Amino acid sequence: MELSVLPESNAIPKQVDIVIDGGWVVTVDGTRKIYRDGFVAVDDTKIVAVGRREDLASQYRGRKTIDGSNKVTIPGMSNGHRHLLCCAKGAMPEGGTTLEALRRFIYPSFSRLTEEDMHTYALHATAEMVRFGTTSFEEPGCNHLEAVLEAVATSGMRCRIGPWTWDQAGSAGDTDLPDWLRFTAPEAAKRLERGVETVRRFKNPRIRDAVTIEGVGTCSDQLTVAAANLALEAESLMVLHKSTSEREVALELKAYGHRPIEHMHKIGALNERVFMNHVTSVADWEVELIADSGARISKNPSTALKLAKGTTHFGKWPELLDAGVRVMLGTDAENCSNHQDITRAIYLAALLPRDARQDPNAVSAEQAVEMGTINGSRALGWDDVVGGIEVGMEADITIFAAEDFDWRPLHNPIANLVYGATGHSVHTVLIAGEVVLDNKQLTKVDELALREDVEAIDRRVLKEIGIDPAPAWPVL
């Protein structure tokens, strides 16, 4: 009897929008899998497959194929503190503490920006973040909100955002504060409500609202409590600068008899919808208050170093992480950090606590990567749609070219990413499956034209506020 032999099945590959074919894939998923020769398939906005190349490459064909060989693919990075309300990079007078820098240079600069300026600055700031591999960020309060929303939408980025709000009635007093957007506490609370409504009315799925107050001793208890309550009621995030330095701690102890985090707890303004920037000066028992409340934090190491905030002395990095606090990383504004490169923040997050404690295990390389990626999704409240590189999540992905000295030799991509890489090696960036950086070229804006426009704004503002940005050394 003759047996018939069925022909081998030649299944037709499924067509998807994008495949990342080969190379290291660091998923930062629930089990933290890393693929040495990986494969990622993206269709529309979502990741539809991730795994070993040998298992998946024959199953998917991309309308666009990204060659992943000699590359390292990670989840899109998040910036937990990035002002779009900006000032001239490199122009801030040297030697100032946080409060001095704010009142002498930063606030006056902010007050001079027009609606058109804000749109240009926002386009430039988001372009810089994308170029260095950032896919989502938190903006702690801007002016001309509608113009900024249009710019963020153009960038394609994910964002938490709201209007700059203060009543200038906090523990630091109102000396040297500009008569710029000065409100009473009830007026400021109404502005916050309108901000939430404005962002929601804009109806961009990648932009979510935040209840943004300045903090740093500029907001009354009445406003702070109102903002915290609004964030709860609106299921938003209440964002503020808090516990930024020992000087702020001293001001609040003098004014209220409480440390900053303690005081927020005492007045009922510390809850799971609170997102605090900096949190540099913290007592051990305040860590417990933060953890118990469910509040979230952005640590901004380069700002802390530049403005001498004392993060290595008072920062409580390991304690916050061990307590399960959602800690992410940020880069702040132009003159507080002078760069928007989250890989540099990851580097500092791993190393500063080790030196401070003389403990090489204070913060691990893996924890630093988590702070720069998946912790951002959790802290910003985006973890319902983005997170690690896993099926079902939206495709926010950063791909590094790994062909230069900072990545080679490449034995452990986590080590190379944390200790050696910078954002200059970012090759491709996807946000919700959209390619916003392709082979180191921005796809949404004209980078050179933007730079010229921003420098023209800077020159005008510096002249208006009377700041000469010339170097201390003689310029001939």
Image (tube, rainbow, N blue to C red):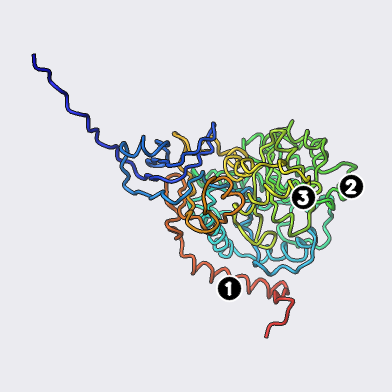
Is residue 217 toward the left or the right of residue 160 in the image? right
Q: Amino acid at mark 1?
A: Ala
Which residue is at the front of the view, 250 or 165? Answer: 250
Is residue 65 toward the left or the right of residue 36 in the image? left
Q: Position of residue 467 (x, y in %)?
A: 72, 73
Q: Amino acid at mark 2?
A: Ala
Q: Is residue 153 visible?
A: yes
The residue wearing badge 1 is: 456
Question: Hey, which quadrant is residue 335 in on the image?
Answer: bottom right
Q: How many marks?
A: 3
Location of the N terminus (image quadrant): top left
In the picture, the disc for residue 311 is 3
- Residue at x 69% of width, y 36% of height: 325
Q: Position of residue 239 (x, y in %)?
A: 68, 45
Q: Position of residue 384 (x, y in %)?
A: 53, 34
With respect to residue 8, does 431 lie above or below?
below
Question: Hey, which quadrant is residue 231 in on the image?
Answer: top right
The residue wearing badge 2 is: 255
Is residue 204 toward the left or the right of residue 369 in the image? left
Dot 1 crowding, Cα within 10 Å, few <14, some 14–19, many 20+:
few
Is residue 270 toward the left or the right of residue 452 in the image? right
- Residue at x 62% of width, y 70% of height: 458
